[in-house]
Image: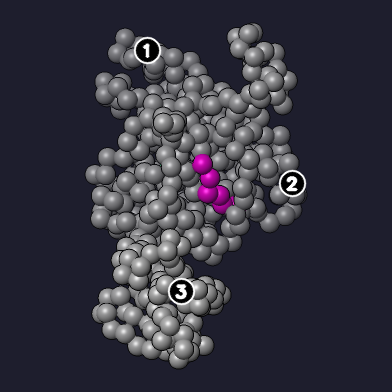
Amino acid sequence: MAQKVQGTEDLFGGYMRAWQRMQDVARELFGSYGFDMIETPAIEQVDTFVHGIGESTDVVRKEMFRVFSGALLPDVLERGSEGHLKPRQRMAMRPEGTAGVVRAAVENNFVPQGAAPAKLWYAEAMFRGERPQKGRLRQFHQVGVEWLGASDPAADAECIIMLMEYFCRLGFSRESLRLTINSMGDAACRPAYRDKVRAFILDHAEEMCEDCLERAQINPLRAFDCKNDHCREVMADAPLAPDNLCDECAAHYAAVKRYLDAAGVSYVEDPTLVRGLDYYTRTVFEVEVVGAGVGAIGGGGRYDGLVELEGGKPTPGLGFAVGFERICLALAEQGVDLGGEEPSCVYVACTPGEDTRAAAFETCLALRSAGVRTEADYQGRSLKAQFKQADKLGARLCAIIGSDELAAGVVTLRDMVSHEQVQVPAAELAERVTARLA
Ligand code: AMP
């Protein structure tokens, strides 16, 4: 039997409804903030991710799924690397959404000089070659937003407020959510801070793991995220980003907090919060569900240098992404089923006979044109078996057509819960059904 790829999942039934609900809630809420939906290709040139996410990140170094056409693959395998390919021939599945959206914004000039900001949201599958485990997949789904052209700290605050509102509308209780924020500085102050952290790690080299020593060279701030408890203990004494901000970054961070306070959004400042992707500047944030044990369910931040890295003009930007699978796991722990119940339907049953079957066929069409989810029998079942199937499908009502009904121009409408039956004129069925379902 063919099997799915490790770390991937099929979305169907309640799980699929949950994914659709996440999109519906996003469309409504993000729409009220002025965001429009975008879909970028699942494959991009590798350079889009290398420039955007950063060469030193785990995502780019270890987790990207490369894509080669059948014509190129033998050549790549033979030479042992893709180094000889032209940039446009080097492709990868998107590991996150921001780089692709920013690439699209640059290519389509979404934010010309003097224009209003571009506000975009997406709901897409992402691909990362991580070791599959609970809440960690190789193909997972994210809903995210990108807001390009806004430098105002009010935008950072609105982004965070919108994110927290999104979680609440999905069904999380606000008390269960832990929002952490930090500022990572910008091109003016971060290089010096990064050097300080590097020097700190090298001063404590004997106490740190191999990975952290490697991080010291390429991305020292990632040492704050080390899984090794001892490294984290050592890093507790490392210089902290908020103490090393330039005046502009400090003022920006203070303003973001003022706006959050004014909106009554509670948060925890975590001066060691560094996000895994290189492009973040200034504000970063993450949301966890206390006690759910699934890791962060969403996070994001400001990335003022990213548009330039993707070849555009200097344009500030910010955004966030939330993970569908982890949200479902965390909601399930709170007893919330995001997929909800299967939508109810009306079942059209008929006694055997060409005339009754033809009338059932027409009745189905009429109900569907009235927007009613309608089911019928397509396997020649007995009336009793049709009722059984109607129950299985969770039908609220059953429209029954026998030769008596046909002769009288009526349909028997049976309430599947109370088992109460009434006869209604065939011509009024759709109207009566809609009223009953409402
Ligand atoms: P990131 O792009 O790494 O900041 O991730 C944003 C969100 O996507 C996280 O908070 C998770 O909810 C989700 N996420 C990231 N990686 C995975 C993965 N491998 N499997 C499932 N969800 C993930």
Mark 2 vs mark 3: in front? 3
Between 16 and 228, the one nearer to me in the picture: 16
Identify the residue at image location x=25%, y=49%.
333
Residue 237 seen anywhere in this rendered image of the structure: no
**How many numbered marks does the figure carry?**
3
Residue 318 seen anywhere in this rendered image of the structure: yes
Q: Where is residue 288 in the image (x, y as percent from the top left)?
A: 33, 45
> Which label was assigned to residue 353?
3
Identify the residue at image location x=71%, y=38%.
312
Q: Are marks 1 and 3 in contact (CB under 8 Å)?
A: no
Identify the amino acid type marked 1: Glu
Q: Where is residue 86 in the image (x, y as percent from the top left)?
A: 73, 20
Q: Is mark 1 on a helix, strand or loop?
A: helix
Judging by the rendered image, the residue that carries numbered circle 1 is 210
Q: Do the residues labelled 2 and 1 touch (CB within 8 Å)?
A: no
Identify the amino acid type marked 3: Gly
Judging by the rendered image, the residue that carries numbered circle 2 is 109
Identify the residue at image location x=72%, y=55%.
115
Q: Is residue 124 rendered magenta in the image?
A: yes
Residue range highlighted in magenta: 120-125
State how far apart marks 2 and 1 are (Cα): 43 Å
Q: Position of residue 157 (x, y in %)?
A: 48, 54
Q: Is residue 163 rendered magenta in the image?
A: no
